[in-house]
Image (cartoon, rainbow, N blue to C red):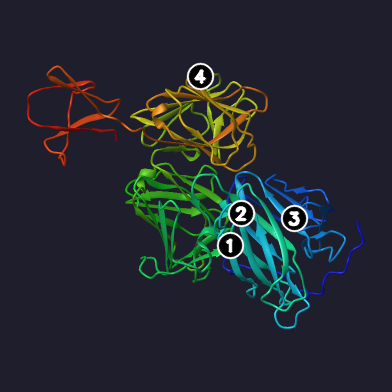
């Protein structure tokens, strides 16, 4: 290793990321893509720990590649150096354990993830007497990452500003040597992007030089199913949070009756609850959080950590179908609109709700056992359309068929393509496939999955993880209007009812591709499979669908009026405002003889 250079003089204080004492000390990690989906503490995790190299370093999950540069334009490679608890750049000048001078560091995120936090250490201005401020810049964002600081011991980050893809902020060197915790409420802004960190002396201080070092970073999914995670709500910032799509509004309260508003509180980017009480990042015994869903959308997944005691969710219209395939709870019950369960061992656990209609358009209330010391710390809330089938709906790992809660989609597993020989569905955490082949948790080799739609419903999006090779979907009546927001798909082609695309996304993040023309699959049976080549596979996370637009056609044939429609039930009324009544025993085309009383018609498809 290169001979060490002296680190700029900083006081060495003990560093601790302490949470409230009431939190359980047991930490159990499930083998799942939980939030945050990945991260690295550079002093501990390979390949960063103890490194000294000019070669770019990729995290063990393959989702982050970090590189050092001798110039701010990031064109001349320089050594990445991890020393003690810090990670910096040694370009041959300045301090080898810090990012300083004209040096730069880049963080290249894999498609499907973006930065959710960056922790700095031994950072700030040097040489000043009043205000040792460094001006740090992080460029490369696709939009505003909505950055904010959660102070550790004392505030260090200030003057956060975003413009044209670049975030700038001042960082105070206060001789405490502790963390500067920078979080991003909008991780999608860094999804698949190459972020570049540079610095300078801040014009707001009197420092003569500057330095920065990284301690850790985390990343979260950016192109998966919409969800609420801790960094979104921010610590002690607001008591009301509404998702960008307007589907879910959450509110925090300091009482279990939801009458006294209280801000949300978070613990880093791991979990959130209500600020105050025994634990500021959890729902305590005298607190609650309400979840208000828009019509047509309901709770599909709830993830918790550091939790104990009985957790209750009230406000369901019917049994929401609580499932816990990984066994992270006990004593689950449902009665009179309330689901209750006991989380296990304080670990991270995922709970699914197979009947989204039970919470669609409803307001749920999350509370815990009033006994002192109990809490529920939320690490994710996911919601879905009532017209969906998710991995959480796939019950057990032995059946060959599964029907969505609304009855509009049935999937069938086959060991061959096209499907003639039934196979078995196999679910693991939040993805599923067909048992057998090279991977029992994915569709591979000759295997296929049949998607049978009914009632005028058609495919609108498909979610997958661990997917590589060519994906093939056959059985469309017309072009389904394929779109991949992540930009991962290549070789996209449609012809004669068959859509194919290549998807090299073999890592953990969920990616959703979209279909703008549900009429192309409405009421049809689709076959989903790979090209059969070695290494090709897909692990399905969800299938979303919607009713295709229905056009009621009117034609005059002689002295009659003929009405035609592709699906649904014909209804009639005597005036445009209704009341419309269903017409029994009527099928398309329907002939309405003239003359007769004036009537108005429409078609009901739901």
Determine whether label 3 and label 2 are within 8 Å by CB: no
Dot label at residue 73: 3
**296 up-or-down from 476: above or below:** below
Name the residue beneath numbered marker 4: 419
Q: Secondary structure at mark 1?
A: strand
How crowded pointer 1 is (Cα within 10 Å; few <14, some 14-19, many 20+) is rated as some
Q: Nearer the viewer, residue 486 or 414?
A: 486
Q: Quadrant of residue 467?
A: top right
How crowded pointer 3 is (Cα within 10 Å; few <14, some 14-19, many 20+) is rated as few
Mark 1 or mark 3: whose residue is earlier in sequence:
3
Q: Secondary structure at mark 3?
A: loop
Name the residue beneath numbered marker 1: 162
Q: Position of residue 581 (x, y in %)?
A: 16, 34
Q: Nearer the viewer, residue 350 or 597?
A: 597
**135 up-or-down from 34: above or below:** below
Q: Residue at x 58, y 39 (%)?
A: 487
Q: Quadrant of residue 217?
A: bottom right
Q: Nearer the viewer, mark 3 or mark 2?
A: 3
Q: Residue at x 83, y 56 (%)?
A: 50
Mark 4 or mark 3: whose residue is earlier in sequence:
3
**323 up-or-down from 408: above or below:** below
The answer to whether residue 323 shows anywhere in this view is: yes
Q: Nearer the viewer, mark 4 or mark 3?
A: 3
| Side of 171 relative to 574 (left or right) | right
Dot label at residue 141: 2
Q: Position of residue 266 (x, y in %)?
A: 54, 64
Q: State the CA–CA distance, disc 4 to disc 1.
A: 52 Å
**606 up-or-down from 473: above or below:** below
| Side of 425 relative to 359 (left or right) | right
Q: Secondary structure at mark 2?
A: loop
């Amino acid at each position: 290793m290169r001979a060490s250079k002296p680190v700029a003089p900083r006081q060495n204080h003990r560093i601790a990321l302490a949470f409230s004492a009431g939190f359980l000390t047991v930490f159990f990690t499930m083998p799942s893509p939980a939030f945050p989906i990945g991260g690295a503490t550079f002093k501990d995790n390979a390949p960063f720990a103890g490194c000294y190299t000019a070669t770019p370093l990729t995290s063990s999950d393959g989702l982050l590649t970090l590189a050092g540069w001798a110039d701010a334009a990031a064109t001349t490679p320089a050594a990445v150096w991890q020393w003690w608890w810090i990670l910096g750049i040694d370009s041959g000048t300045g301090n080898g354990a810090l990012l300083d001078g004209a040096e730069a560091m880049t963080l290249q995120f894999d498609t499907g993830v973006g930065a959710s936090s960056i922790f700095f250490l031994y950072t700030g201005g040097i040489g000043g007497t009043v205000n040792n401020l460094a001006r740090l810049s992080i460029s490369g964002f696709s939009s505003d990452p909505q950055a904010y600081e959660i102070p550790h011991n004392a505030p260090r980050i200030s003057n956060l500003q975003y413009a044209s893809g670049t975030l700038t902020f001042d960082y105070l060197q206060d001789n405490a040597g502790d963390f500067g915790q920078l979080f991003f409420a909008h991780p999608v802004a860094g999804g698949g992007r190459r972020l570049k960190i540079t610095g300078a002396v801040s014009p707001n201080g009197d420092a003569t030089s500057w330095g920065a070092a990284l301690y850790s970073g985390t990343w979260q999914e950016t192109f998966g199913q919409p969800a609420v995670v801790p960094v979104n709500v921010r610590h002690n910032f607001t008591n009301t949070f509404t998702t960008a799509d307007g589907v879910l509004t959450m509110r925090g309260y300091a009482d279990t009756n939801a009458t006294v508003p209280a801000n949300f509180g978070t613990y880093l980017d791991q979990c959130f609850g209500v600020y105050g009480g025994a634990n500021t990042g959890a729902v305590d015994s005298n607190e609650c959080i309400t979840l208000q869903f828009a019509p047509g959308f309901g709770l599909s997944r709830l993830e918790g950590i550091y939790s104990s005691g009985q957790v209750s969710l009230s406000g369901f219209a019917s049994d929401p179908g609580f499932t816990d395939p990984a066994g992270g709870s006990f004593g689950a019950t449902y009665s009179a609109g309330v689901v209750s369960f006991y989380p296990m061992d304080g670990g991270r656990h995922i709970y699914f709700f197979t009947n989204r209609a039970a919470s669609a358009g409803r307001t749920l209330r999350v509370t815990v056992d009033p006994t002192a010391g109990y809490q529920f710390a939320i690490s994710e809330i996911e919601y879905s359309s009532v017209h969906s089938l998710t991995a959480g709906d796939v019950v057990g790992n032995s059946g060959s068929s599964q029907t969505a809660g609304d009855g509009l989609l049935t999937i069938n597993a086959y060991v061959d393509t096209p499907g003639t020989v039934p196979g078995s569905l196999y679910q693991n955490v939040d993805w599923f496939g067909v048992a057998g082949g090279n991977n029992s948790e994915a569709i591979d080799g000759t295997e296929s999955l049949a998607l049978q739609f009914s009632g005028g419903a058609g495919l609108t999006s498909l979610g997958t993880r661990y997917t590589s090779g060519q994906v093939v979907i056959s059985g469309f009546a017309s072009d389904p209007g394929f779109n991949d927001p992540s930009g991962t798909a290549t070789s996209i082609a449609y012809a004669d009812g068959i859509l194919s695309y290549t998807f090299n996304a073999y890592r953990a993040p969920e990616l959703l591709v979209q279909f703008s023309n549900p009429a192309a699959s409405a009421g049809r049976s689709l076959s989903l499979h790979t090209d059969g080549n070695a290494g090709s596979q897909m692990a399905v996370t969800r299938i979303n669908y919607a009713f295709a637009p229905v056009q009621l056609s009117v034609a005059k044939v002689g002295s009659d009026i003929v009405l035609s429609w592709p699906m649904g039930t014909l209804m009639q009324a005597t005036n445009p405002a209704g009341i419309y009544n269903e017409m029994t025993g009527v099928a398309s085309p329907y002939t309405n003889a003239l003359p007769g009383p004036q009537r108005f018609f429409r078609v009901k498809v739901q």
